[in-house]
Image: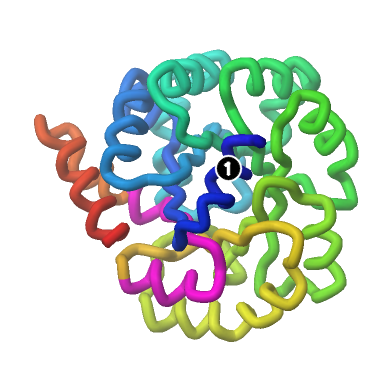
């Protein structure tokens, strides 16, 4: 059983997944921060692979990616970070990024080395199911889960296709738009409008909901009826507001605990 499958098999709900930009705020901070956030309550970690043209990311994660790229982060650095986390933790790790850097690095090489480093799955927002055959094959060969996304403008038929072609879980995008923390009432109204469709059409995989969650209230209400939630931009904002104070990791961990409970 994969680490992701084992996590969802525990029956504990809701699952809290946290998104970190690799190499942010500093090149050498990702491993220690990831381990600290697991202690604060993270059940799953998504490691963002910075890219210069991130079509799914809003201003907060774009800025974090710009800083990480300026810090010199590369795919070899990111794989080393995965190895560093895996050496000290069994928490599921998912890499989230875009296809161009993978093609530049070497397609088959990337998936093979990601699995060898200890990654459990891949999210590529710019690879739609119609164009994902090679990625699915590479993930299957390496033993990685390939996680696809649905959004409010995804048709029922397309949701069912995505469910059939995803493994690990399905990423439910709460709003039509890019990443970013949003007003809680606006977020809940948007999600409530299409959660019933998600539950009706995503039947094979667990579902985690992301984009816009910034508080415990958001997390619980938005993920109700699903399997859990993902916190990204609000976590990056917490890091940006705390770093480089000597206690910045303590402050970020406190934010994570507040979202968890």
Name the residue: 40% across, 50% down. Answer: 60
User: In which image quadrant can residue 176 be found?
Assistant: bottom right
Q: Nearer the viewer, residue 52 or 24?
A: 24
Q: What element carries label 1?
A: helix
Residue under numbered circle 1: 6
Residue 193 drawn in magenta: no
Give percent across and percent down for residue 143. Answer: 74, 28
Q: Determine the residue positioned at 69% across, 63% down.
A: 150
Q: Which colour scheme is used?
A: rainbow
Quarter of the figure with the N terminus = top right
Quadrant where the C terminus lies? bottom left
Q: In this view, does 29 lie above or below 154?
A: above
Q: Where is residue 57 in the image (x, y as percent from the top left)?
A: 54, 51
Please give left or right for residue 60 compared with residue 152 in the image.
left
Is residue 178 placed above or below 108 in the rendered structure? below
Specify start and end residues of the magenta stretch as a single range: 217-236
| Number of callouts | 1
* Image position of 233 (left or right of 94): left
- Residue 211's x, y, as percent? 50, 61
Task: Determine crowd level at label 1: few under 14, some 14-19, many 20+ residues with C-alpha closer than 10 A.
Answer: few
Seen at 81% across and 35% down, the residue is 135
Q: Which residue is drawn at 70% across and 32% down?
A: 144
Q: From what the image shows, is residue 165 above or below residue 115?
A: below
Image position of 124 (left or right of 128) = left
Residue 251, horizontal then vertical, whole percent: 16, 44
């Amino acid at each position: 059983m994969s680490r992701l499958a084992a996590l969802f098999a525990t029956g504990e709900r809701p699952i809290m997944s946290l998104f970190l930009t690799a190499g942010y705020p500093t090149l050498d901070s990702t491993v220690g921060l990831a381990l600290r956030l697991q202690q604060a309550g993270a059940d799953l970690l998504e490691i963002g692979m910075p890219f210069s043209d991130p079509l799914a990311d809003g201003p907060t994660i774009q800025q974090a990616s710009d800083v990480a790229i300026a810090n010199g982060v590369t795919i070899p650095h990111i794989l080393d970070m995965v190895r560093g986390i895996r050496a000290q933790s069994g928490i599921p790790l998912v890499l989230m990024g875009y296809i161009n850097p993978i093609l530049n690095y070497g397609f088959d090489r990337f998936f093979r080395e990601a699995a060898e480093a200890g990654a459990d799955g891949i999210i590529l927002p710019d690879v739609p199911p119609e164009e994902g055959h090679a990625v699915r094959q590479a993930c299957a060969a390496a033993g990685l889960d390939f996680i696809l996304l649905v959004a409010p403008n995804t048709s029922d038929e397309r949701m069912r296709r995505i469910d059939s072609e995803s493994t690990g879980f399905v990423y439910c995008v709460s709003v039509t738009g890019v990443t970013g923390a949003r007003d809680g009432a606006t977020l809940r109204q948007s999600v409530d409008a299409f959660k019933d469709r998600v539950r009706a059409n995503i039947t094979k995989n667990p579902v985690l909901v992301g984009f816009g969650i910034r508080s415990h209230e958001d997390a619980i209400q938005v993920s109700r009826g699903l399997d859990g939630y993902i916190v990204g931009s609000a976590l990056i904002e917490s890091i940006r507001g705390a770093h480089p104070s000597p206690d910045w990791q303590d402050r970020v961990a406190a934010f994570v605990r507040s979202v968890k409970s």
